[in-house]
Amino acid sequence: MELRGLDNKDFDSWLALWSGYQDFYKVKIPSSVTEVTFSRLLDPDERMKCLVIEDDGEVIGLVHYIFHRSTWTEGNYCYLQDLYVTPTQRSKGVGKKLIEAVYREAKDSNCSRVYWLTHETNYKGRLLYDRVADNAGFIQYRKNIE
């Protein structure tokens, strides 16, 4: 397995995983947003990043993460926004490798924290998350701005 940054040639593979992620969370992100997102992930000046894991020429997992300022620290935080592994490759350590890679990226960028959200019903994912991070016990509130 090869862990690497996203490349322009990965669009179709990335899109298949991105679509699977949306299906998992029962959302439909417009194609125009998806195109902008992919473009941002490739832009070296963006604070939004993507790593993928490739196995035998097939991209089998992705992680999107974003560096941002915090009022609580001098350094940045790292928000792990999306993590997705092809269903046939789950429980093989791919998700853990992606999370640990984000930890390394965050450390190299002098971030003091990596954090993420997941749905309370994501039981399989939470089994991994409980092993690699601490559940801070926060509840998310949100208001969509239209």
Image (tube, grey):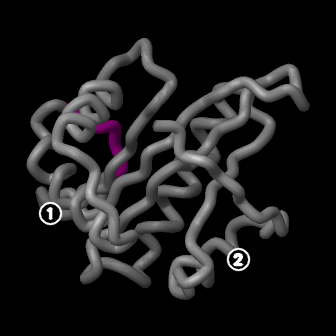
Q: Quadrant of the N terminus?
A: bottom left
Q: Secondary structure at mark 1?
A: loop
x%, y% of residue 129? 64, 72
What segment is highlighted magenta in the picture?
3-7
Residue at 12% in and 57% down: 57
Q: Which residue is mark 2?
A: 130
Q: Quadrant of residue 20?
A: bottom left
What x and y, as percent, mark residue 17? 24, 60
* Residue in the picture at 17% in, 43% down: 31
Residue visible at 61% across and 84% down in the picture: 127
Q: Name the secondary structure under disc 2.
A: helix
Main secondary structure along the magenta-highlighted residues: strand
**In this rendering, is residue 55 above or below 48?**
below
Q: Which mark is residue 56?
A: 1
Residue 128, relative to residue 19: is it above or below?
below
Of the residues shown, which amino acid type is indicated by label 1?
A: Asp
- Find residue 60 and report its image quarter: bottom left
The residue lying toward the viewer, choosing from 91 and 27, is 27
